[in-house]
Amino acid sequence: SCSNVPITIRIKRSSDNEVMATATIYVTVNPYKLTYNANGGYGEPSQQTTDSSVVISTTVPKRFGYTFLGWSASSTATSPAYLPDSTINLSSDKTLYAVWKPASAISLSTIYTATVDFPYQEIYYTFTPTASTRYVIESTGSTDSKVYVYHVSEKEIGNNDDGGDGNNFLLEADLVSGAKYYIKICAYSTRVGSIPFTIEKLTYDVRYDANGGTGTMDKFILGQGDIIPSNGFTRKGHR
């Protein structure tokens, strides 16, 4: 809406600077509009109006498989010019476009760090298993964190909040070889910070006992669905 700004005018006599008359006039000011465009996502903030500066909305848009980085005046930007809760100065109407980063691919046995820069930011990764088995995704560190796993079809496979040590997540999920999955990591509530995490096959130590026979067999580390090695023990009169 428009706003009326009062301006007071004083008429002074030049000889002694005495105020001879005063008058107040009102100037109509049309505020500038700040519009948000989710740029392929959804849930963008509502339009804001201001006479000069405004705080960027803390509402975070969403897009499956993409991490929201912030806002830019360019719809093709790859890095943000503004973050939620920062201040922008306006001298005309402006549209801000969401800046998205496609999910990064991850692999087994590597420590990754999801960095949450502002509240409610969701960090996406992709993972394509090479074996059909159970996998475990676990975070470490001090940031209270959550994890979700989705099939490429956007069907949720599972999620976890505090299954690990302290406030860390620990999620076990049965994944199929060759299928593409999305892993979404976020901090709990309005928290921010770094979240180190790994994804591994869930494995078990398997030890063998001759149980009256002879011979030796080494300990094996096996995952779900792995083939048990052939028997290496013998016992006279037994099979």
Image (cartoon, rainbow, N blue to C red):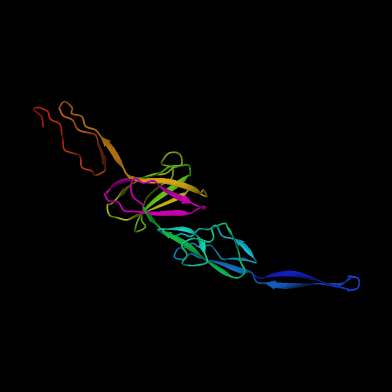
Query: In the displayed structure, does residue 6 sit left or right of residue 188?
Result: right
33 lies left or right of 5:
left
Q: Is residue 85 left or right of residue 179?
A: right
Residue at figure coordinates x 20%, y 29% from the top left: 209
Which residue lies at the image location 91% right of the left edge and 70% below the top edge? 16
Above or below residue 203? Residue 89 is: below
- Where on the picture, by quarter, is residue 178? bottom left
| Residue 215 percent location from the top left of the image | 16, 29
Of 44 and 121, nearer the camera is 121
Residue farthest to the front?
15
Nearest to the observer: residue 159 or residue 207: 207
Q: Is residue 133 magenta?
A: yes
**Could you tell me if residue 188 is visible in this image?**
no
As for residue 28 lying within the magenta part, the answer is no
Residue occupying the far right of the picture:
16
| Residue 119 position within the rendered picture, expressed as x and y whole percent measured from the top left | 52, 52
Quadrant containing the N terminus is bottom right
Q: Is residue 11 or residue 190 the one in the foreground?
A: 11
76 lies above or below 161: below
When the figure is inspected, residue 13 is found, relative to residue 213, above or below; the finding is below
**Displayed quadrant of residue 55:** bottom right
Q: Residue 77 at x, y = what percent?
A: 47, 64
Query: Which portion, as a residue range, is magenta?
Result: 106-135
Q: Residue furthest left?
A: 237
Give the total number of marks visible in the rendering: 0
The residue at 59%/68% (across/down) is 33
Q: Quadrant of the C terminus?
A: top left
Residue at the location (29% across, 40% down)?
203
Residue 82 visible in image: yes
Q: Nearer the viewer, residue 173 or 107?
A: 107
